Image (tube, grey):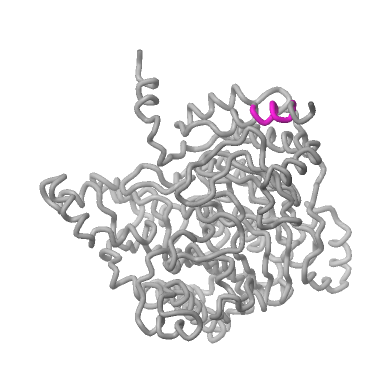
Amino acid sequence: MRLFYSALLFSALLAACGGKDEDAGQKQETRDRAVTAEAATAQQPAQMQDTLPDSKPSPAPQTTPEATTTAQSPPAQRQAQAAKRADSAGSKPNILVIFGDDIGWTNLTAYEHGVMGYRTPNIDRIAEEGALFTDHYAQPSCTAGRAAFLTGQYPIRSGMTTVGQPGDKLGLQPESPSLARVLKSAGYRTGHFGKNHLGDRNEHLPTVHGFDEFFGNLYHLNTQEESEQRDYQNFGKKFSGDLEKYEQSFGTRGVIHSLATDDMDDTEDPRFGVVGKQKIEDTGPLTQKRMHNFDSEEVIPRALKFMEASKNEGKPFFVWLNTSRMHLYTRIDDEWLQKVEKYTSEADYHGAGMLQHDHDIGVVLDWLDKQGLADNTIVIYSTDNGPEHSSWPHGATTPFRGEKMTTFEGGVRVPMMARWPGHIPAGAELNGIQGHQDLFTTLAAAAGVQDVAEKMMQEKKQYIDGVNNLPYWLGESKQSARDYIFYYYESKLTAVRMGPWKFHFSTKEDYYANLVPRTVPLVFNIRMDPYESYDSPDSYGHLMQKVSWLIQPMGALMQQHLQSLKEYPPVQGGKSFDMSNVVEEFINKAPQ
């Protein structure tokens, strides 16, 4: 009977959380109906930290009076002390965040210990000289994962829940938080190099969202080469009567180089909008040929030049370096295929790309050493989402169930490493739950920006989902500041993890599968079964009956989440590729 009532609770919560994609105003109306008086007064449940000890615990901080005080302080005080020390320890740290694209857990030696044959010694070095995180979460797709990092929010708040189409008005809005803005206001030079994927209109470009300079592509990689298909060209000519006219209406922009300015440029492109306070240069299409060495010959050199200029100006830098590797398709020189075949096969495009990618990251790390910047630079390495495993041999791989575009662990659990010599203990393996949204808050604290979540509430009326995990990184706390996390697929809340317990409300097995709602959640203990493999009725049914008492605390967390969405509504509605009900919805919205 208890399970029956638990199912009723799930139905009510899912009705409130998982409805159709609507504009922000309609979402607000839905939430106003869904959030009850109980939600408004719900209190934060006691912390239910997954208490698994870290595989390689961080060495204890030196026993100075300050360290002793910190160890005995409550979490909020420890976080403030960590931020204060970071700001007062001398010059502010430089921050270099490197995102690969669709990088698989099993494609880095630091995680798979040689199982794939080839090795990634340069990327592994970041973990060896810093910390490796085992339970770090991105999002199911490129856009959502990048938005979570830059805004410190679940993407439902920014509306950046899935990829937009070229020229779409869906993109990062000025109302949304931006880590670049936060750090720029703290005295940093801010540069973004490589893939952005947060909208392609002029008002979406990084240089109007806090970055001083941007150079990179605005879409997932394979869209950039579509215009080289004869099918594309033939269709475009027939559809628009002229290929150039078709491109003007539906084609992508090229690789963009933009600089932030103080002067308003009112020039308006009929498709991509007003230029605004920036200078924009389209450097041409990212062709298949250009893809071969785009990272090594264009993206990384510009990032290094930006960091060198910052050093010469005596200013700290924040650089977000997003490589094109390893998104499909892998357009690569033969030399890398020849190198990988001794480990795997000449058919291993992904392995060849990983060797090149690791080499490129090594160039960046060696440059930091030669410039004398390594000791005062926080280096982060991660990726936007899980691997696109279904696209073999171009796709990555993972030991976890699912892949990109799913909320099984394989779609969202990603590599994450952090290095900060003298601050983050070398060789630490941290098993606490953490998400991309937490990087926003943690890096802000490391830069000396205290209470950034409160600042965003006051300045932008925006709720920050990220927690400050700096004490955990520095070895001053044995537990992550995060003990639960929500999983979204586009605008639908599909799962939640509390400590080791994970409940799926809807499931999607692979990239191209349909999202299937469940009347009774699929439950796993992520420590007992990290691969979410025990899914027969005998196994998960027994577990569901055993832990049905978790439904109420989970309901409290979800009610709090809903309440925060009511008080701080999303800035825009998300979008979906599901067109099955588009006509019916259009008719229902039309004036009667």
Residue 467 spot, x, y in % from top left: 68, 52
Residue 470 spot, x, y in % from top left: 71, 61
Q: Residue at x 65, y 37 (%)?
A: 561
Does the rendering let one see residue 152? yes
Residue 443 spot, x, y in % from top left: 62, 61
Q: Is residue 555 above or below residue 186?
A: above
Q: Is residue 493 above or below residue 467?
A: above
Name the image quarter holding residue 568.
top right
Question: Of residues 207 and 333, which is closer to you in this image?
Answer: 333
244 horizontally vs 565: left or right: left
Q: Main secondary structure of the magenta part?
A: helix
Q: Residue at x 67, y 48 (%)?
A: 535
Question: Of residues 203 and 103, which is closer to you in this image?
Answer: 103
Residue 72 spot, x, y in % from top left: 89, 59
> Does the magenta segment cover residue 239?
no
Q: Which residues are magenta?
A: 5-11
> Does the magenta segment cover residue 8?
yes
533 horizontally vs 229: left or right: right
Name the image quarter holding residue 60.
bottom right
Q: Is residue 163 above or below residue 122?
A: above
Does the rendering let one see residue 80? no
Q: Residue at x 59, y 71 (%)?
A: 379
138 horizontally vs 275: left or right: right
Question: Of residues 83 and 576, which is closer to you in this image?
Answer: 576
227 horizontally vs 300: left or right: left
